[in-house]
Amino acid sequence: MFSLSLFNDILRPFNTTYRCWSVSMLPGSEREDVERGGKIIMPPSALDILTRLNINYPMLFKLTNKRANRQTHCGVLEFIADEDKIYIPYWMMKNLLLDEGDMVQIESVSLEVATFSKFQPQNSEFLDITNPKAVLENCLRNFACLTTGDVIAIKYNQKIYEMCVLETKPGNAVSIIECDMNVEFAAPVGYQEPEHEKKPSAEDMMVDPADLMPEPTGFIAFKGSGNRLDGKKKKENSDDKSNQVKAVYQRGIPDYDYNIGTIQFIRNIRPVTNDKENGSQEGFKPFAGSGSVLKTKKNKK
């Protein structure tokens, strides 16, 4: 009978209730290593009970606030707390909706090793970090497990960044001790994508060749003014596009009689005017007048 009761005690999991306090209430020097991680401090009596029970290592626990129906998971850092007390990080107390001195239930659990996790920064300032994945990986070394829905706090360059655990695989609570875990980030809360100016498409940049044609100078059909039947003058509208006739674009006609090796210069021909009738003096004419021929003789040998 004695041996049977002893065997039942060994198989019984660790399950008890403690009063919880924040790390700032821990006597002695300030413990920043506890505040920026996911591990708690328990009393020495808890270690005595755990060593006599059949539990898996590393020691992982589920914390439950039955009054608010909230729970999370954590590891243990040390067994130096006062009896019937535990000290937990402040961010963990916020997730559990606990106040100083409230009762919390602690139960030993065994969690699967994490393979994937997704985080959402609670502030867009997290994007200012050069390598956010490396920073998160370094900070998660102080954590033993992750729980979906928790908002954890990490410290980098004397600044606290809050991260919401959106998803964990293969379960809602996983162990991250000595694991190979893929990490993804969601857009921070309140983040808005910068608006990029739309680049003009190739169709928008195409120019109608008719727009490059000069204004028509000859006869243009249906161009002119009209008269009203009542004798009143019609208001002229210079912006009326209906009166503007666009010239039809015509391609240039090649010179089929072109001789290779020759160059033709097409000049504008001015009409000949009688300078005497106009009373104007004869102007300068290039290459006008007579010239002389310069002949050179070769020296006879």
Image: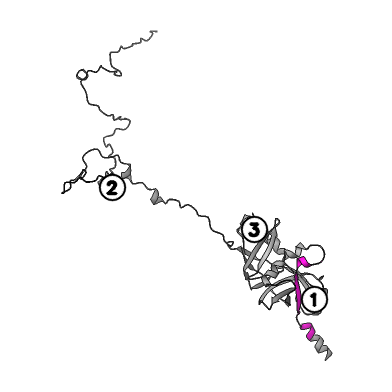
- Mark 2 residue element: helix
Q: Position of residue 206 (x, y in %)?
A: 37, 48
Q: Crowdedness of circle 3 by 10 Å Cα count: few (<14), some, many (20+)?
A: few
Q: Is residue 48 above or below residue 228?
A: below
Furthest residue toward bottom: 1
Q: From the viewer's perspective, is the residue at label 3 or at label 1 nearer? A: 1
Residue at label 2?
241
Residue at label 1?
84
Q: Residue at x 62, y 57 (%)?
A: 125
Q: Sequence order check: which comes first, mark 2 or mark 1?
A: 1
Quadrant of the rendered image containing residue 175: bottom right
Q: CA distance from mark 2 to mark 1?
A: 91 Å
Q: Is residue 41 above or below residue 10?
A: above
107 or 125, which is in the foreground?
125
Quadrant of the rendered image containing residue 177: bottom right
- Mark 3 residue element: helix
Q: Position of residue 287 (x, y in %)?
A: 30, 18
Residue at label 3?
132
Three-letter code, disc 3: Pro
- Residue 14 is inside the magenta segment: yes
Q: Crowdedness of circle 1 by 10 Å Cα count: few (<14), some, many (20+)?
A: some
Which range of residues does the magenta coloring cover?
8-27
| Marks 2 and 3 close (CB-CB < 8 Å) | no
User: Can I make out residue 9 in this image?
Assistant: yes
Three-letter code, disc 1: Asp
262 or 241, which is in the foreground?
241
Three-letter code, disc 2: Lys
| Marks 2 and 1 close (CB-CB < 8 Å) | no
